[in-house]
């Protein structure tokens, strides 16, 4: 999987960010995150997702949104069970903020 997944004719350059926002705001996704024992795989898709936008100009904006989601939104008390996994996932995402082959 790579950037070609986003290159469908008619998609705007912001399409990857729209998809991320749609997933993170999805009521079913939020309900899974609020469970007392959320599935450990629930945040695992971020790395695969980021690898598909690695060479796209939107990368920086999306990484910022992911870090905000993991380090701010998921730190509310209702997501207490997933706090550690959220911070671990943020640490895994951070290397995407330091190197971009397009820079």
Image: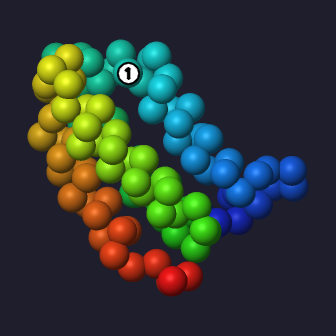
Compared across the picture, whether 53 is left or right of 77 comes to right
Q: Is residue 64 shown above or below 37?
A: below
Q: Quadrant of the N terminus?
A: bottom right
What percent of the width, then of the height, locates residue 81?
A: 14, 26
* Residue situated in front as seen by the camera: 91 or 42: 91
Q: How is the image coloured?
A: rainbow
Above or below, 3 relative to 34: below
- Determine the secondary structure under disc 1: helix
Quarter of the image for residue 34 reads top left
Q: Quick check: can you spot residue 69?
A: yes
Whole-percent x, y for residue 56 in the image: 61, 68
Res 43 quadrant in image: top left
Q: Is residue 19 left or right of residue 41?
A: right
Residue pictured at 30% horizontal, 24% vertical: 33
Vertical side of 1 occupied by 89: above or below = above
Q: How many marks?
A: 1
Instruction: Tell which of 96 and 81 is nearer to you.
Output: 96
**Residue shown at the point (15%, 35%) measured from the top left:** 83
Residue 73 in the image: x percent, y percent? 29, 32
Few, some or many residues within 10 Å of mark 1 (<14, 14–19, 20+): some
Q: Residue at x 18, y 42 (%)?
A: 85
**Residue 76's x, y, as percent?**
20, 25
Outermost residue toward the right? Answer: 9
Q: Is residue 43 above or below residue 7?
A: above
Q: Report whether residue 43 is seen.
A: no
**Side (left or right) of 96 relative to 60:** left
Q: Which residue is mark 1?
A: 30
Residue at x-position 48% and y-position 26%:
25
């Amino acid at each position: 999987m790579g950037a070609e997944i986003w290159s469908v004719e008619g998609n705007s350059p912001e399409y990857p960010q729209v998809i991320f926002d749609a997933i993170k705001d999805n009521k079913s996704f939020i309900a899974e995150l609020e469970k007392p024992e959320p599935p450990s795989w629930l945040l695992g898709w971020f790395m695969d997702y980021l690898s598909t936008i690695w060479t796209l100009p939107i990368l920086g904006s999306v990484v910022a949104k992911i870090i905000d989601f993991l380090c701010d939104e998921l730190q509310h008390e209702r997501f207490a069970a997933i706090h550690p996994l959220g911070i671990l996932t943020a640490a895994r995402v951070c290397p995407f903020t330091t190197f971009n082959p397009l820079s």
